Amino acid sequence: MTDNATDTAHLPKISSAIPDAELTRLTDEIVGALKSVYDPEIPVDIYELGLIYKVDIADDRTVAVEMTLTTPNCPAAAELPGMVESAVAAVPGIADVKVDITFDPPWDQGRMSEEARATLNLW
């Protein structure tokens, strides 16, 4: 007997119209693009800072990025979303990019990678 809470065999397989190899390439290049964007006041990229919460690549190759800022009063609030949009839009094969800012959950230092902590000497 199986537990329905953990048995996923009955669920339909979610597939993408984008071939797996292409989806992997797009994902890797989007992450690379995000790592090229820096908060102007912090010498660490936004990806390693943990500001990127979610990236969705739709079948039509549009990308939705959900991100946050270090604080709601972040001085770079006006420019960071545009920088993210431009960086991701430059990835070959991306049709369009939409960036949404959220503060739920609020960012904290626990979201940073070990690399970011080392760079900022936050051990």
Image (cartoon, rainbow, N blue to C red):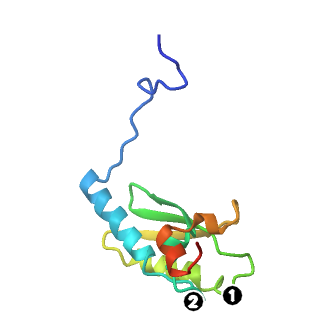
Front residue (pair 113, 47): 113
Q: Position of residue 48 (x, y in %)?
A: 49, 72
Quadrant of the rendered image containing residue 82:
bottom right
Taking the view exactly as shown, the residue that stands out farthest to the right is 73
Q: Position of residue 59 (x, y in %)?
A: 38, 54
Residue shown at the point (43%, 64%) measured from the top left: 62
Residue 95 falls left or right of residue 104 = left
Residue assigned mark 2? 40
- Observer able to see residue 19: no
Residue assigned mark 1? 75
> What crowding class fits label 2: few (fewer than 14 Cα within 10 Å), some (14-19), or many (20 or more)?
few
Question: Where is 1 relative to 10, above or below?
Answer: above
Going from the N terminus, do you reach mark 1 or mark 2 first?
A: 2
- Observer able to see residue 62: yes
Local SS, label 1: loop
Contact between marks 1 and 2 (CB within 8 A): the answer is yes
Quadrant of the rendered image containing residue 96:
bottom left
Residue shown at the point (24%, 55%) measured from the top left: 21
